[in-house]
Amino acid sequence: MSEFHKNYVENIESYFESKLEDDQRLFVTINRFLKFHNLGQMRNNHKLLDLGSGKGTFIEVCKKNGLIATGLDAANGKINFEKDKLPFEDNSFDFISMIAVIEHIKEKNILINEIKRVAKNNASLIVTTPNFKYCYKSFYDDPTHVSPYTEVSLEKFFINHGIKYNKIAPLVINKGNLFWETKFKFFLASILPFRNHDFKNSKLIPNFLRGKSTSILSVSKILK
């Protein structure tokens, strides 16, 4: 992998005290989302594969929460997600995550087929990605972004690959479950005035004004 991609991973910013804290908040949100849709939460001894694991902080959080977690990242040169098979046996994982990864991959057919191969029956595929509908002005500010998605196109992408059970919502941190039931939830998430980490030490901004998000959280069931 090029020096550019190594530097990209190394320079991923954190929003709170550390990337580890960011990913702990993400882990809690994903588990809440899984529980909200009765999809089965990430628990002790579940096996998780994190694709595009970057610095490995999400893997670290998963291990601290009792999961048997493994990560793969293209930046270390050990795999090319567009061409290579995943180095795991069939039916190996209960959860497979791609956290802000799919938008960086142009050719995904091999990867999706490999994900389906290494996933156990009824495994959960967890994906987060920017929602192009609400971040189109800044999406290509990241020079590694090549594949934009909206909540509609992401679901169609999964359905076209035979993954038909999909739950898709805004990636909102520290919001009540009712937010995920709101009809115009993607629009509402995009117009909140503050992100969670904006003026994070200020007590003058109430929580209901925080949580702005232009990202998607998706959980899909892989049925065999």
Image (cartoon, rainbow, N blue to C red):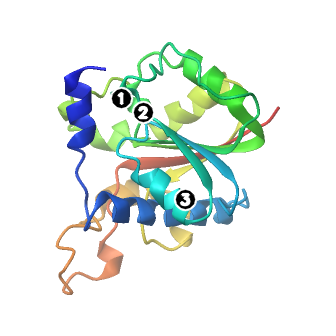
Give the amino acid type for the residue marked by disc 3 in the picture. Lys
Reading the image, the residue beneath label 2 is 73
Percent of width and height locating residue 135:
28, 42
Percent of width and height locating residue 51:
50, 36
213 to 123, vertically: above or below: below
126 to 196, vertically: above or below: above
Give the amino acid type for the residue marked by disc 1 in the picture. Asn
Instruction: Say if mark 3 contacts mark 2, CB within 8 Å.
Output: no
Residue pictured at 62% horizontal, 30% vertical = 158
> Residue 2 or 29: which is nearer the viewer?
2
Percent of width and height locating residue 138:
21, 38
Whole-angstrom CA distance, mark 2 to mark 1, is 6 Å
| SS category of the residue bearing label 3 | helix
Quarter of the picture holding the N terminus: top left
The crowding category of the residue bearing disc 2, from other C-alpha atoms within 10 Å (few below 14, some 14 to 19, many at least 20), is: some
Instruction: Say if mark 2 contacts mark 1, CB within 8 Å.
Output: yes
Residue 120 sits in which quadrant? top right
Reading the image, the residue beneath label 3 is 63
Quarter of the picture holding the C terminus: top right
| Residue 163 in view here | no
Residue pictured at 46% horizontal, 56% vertical = 60
The crowding category of the residue bearing disc 3, from other C-alpha atoms within 10 Å (few below 14, some 14 to 19, many at least 20), is: some
Residue pictured at 39% horizontal, 31% vertical = 103
Going by the image, does 18 lie left or right of 221? left
Reading the image, the residue beneath label 1 is 76
Give the amino acid type for the residue marked by disc 2 in the picture. Asp
Percent of width and height locating residue 175:
45, 71
| SS category of the residue bearing label 2 | loop
100 to 202, vertically: above or below: above
Whole-angstrom CA distance, mark 3 to mark 2, is 17 Å
